[in-house]
Image: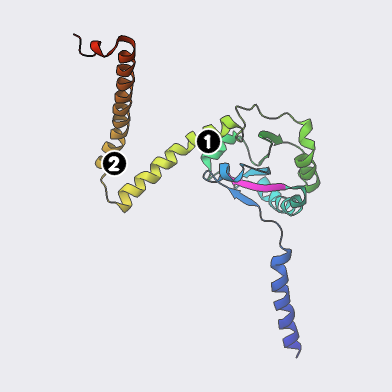
Amino acid sequence: MALNAVLSLLLLAGLIAPAVAGKAVVELTDDNFDAKTSSGVWMIKVYAPWCIHCRQLEPLWQAFADEAEVDGVLVAKVNGDKERYLMSRLRVTGFPTIFLLRDGNTYEYNGPRNVDSFRIFATSGYKKSTAKPFYLAPNSIIGRAIGQLYGVPRLVRSVYRLLHEKHGLSDAAIILGFLAIPVAVGGVLICCLDAVFVQRAKEEFGPEHEHQE
């Protein structure tokens, strides 16, 4: 009977644990950063797995995520060793580095590393800080446009793998295909411009000048 009681308690604990589990810290990557951060308030920690200070911060960051939910703040982290394009966009020079993304602005956090200070900064303390210039903020219009440019090499690699591995095309065929794209686009533009100028000449000089030599 005692064994049954122990098993029942373990089962109950297993059912309760997911319900009381803390808010998960979102893992941001080169691929999902813009989609995830397009709305909401975000506190982001950029870390490196080998960084001792980052490891010390990890439990505090999880505790912050648990409490920040009531403030309407989303908590995330970025693996700086892995997400190199995102590192460049954020202009990170050391680990850990903490940013607040709010209302199209980016603020760097340099205060005490404790949960209360994180919450204060995310909700009101940021007003005492200077935001990054809009052309350097990764969540500004310019920053997101630059992010699309950073994504071009990844897109090219994905297309290459699709053509080479799944469709069996040779490297030479893929290169020729890529080179053919600007040639085709240029040809279409020339035809369009030619049609526009011919039509304009007809309107200005009349159809009798169309075949005049």
In the picture, the disc for residue 174 is 2
Amino acid type indicated by mark 2: Ile
The answer to which image quadrant residue 102 occupies is top right
Q: Is residue 194 left or right of residue 29?
A: left
The answer to which image quadrant residue 48 occupies is top right
Q: CA distance from mark 2 to mark 1?
A: 25 Å
The answer to which image quadrant residue 3 occupies is bottom right
Label located before the other in sequence (2 or 1): 1
Is disc 1 placed on a helix, strand or loop?
helix
Q: In the image, residue 33 lies at what x, y percent?
A: 57, 43
User: Which residue: 70% across, 78% down?
Assistant: 11
Q: In the image, residue 161 lies at what x, y percent?
A: 36, 48
Q: Which residue is mark 1?
A: 147
Q: Which residues are magenta?
A: 73-80
Amino acid type indicated by mark 1: Gly
Residue 117 painted magenta:
no
**Quadrant of image for the C terminus:** top left
Residue 74 against residue 181 in the figure, above or below: below
Q: In the image, residue 97 lies at what x, y percent?
A: 66, 39
Q: Nearer the viewer, residue 158 or 199?
A: 199
Q: Residues within 10 Å of mark 2 (few under 14, many from 20)?
A: some
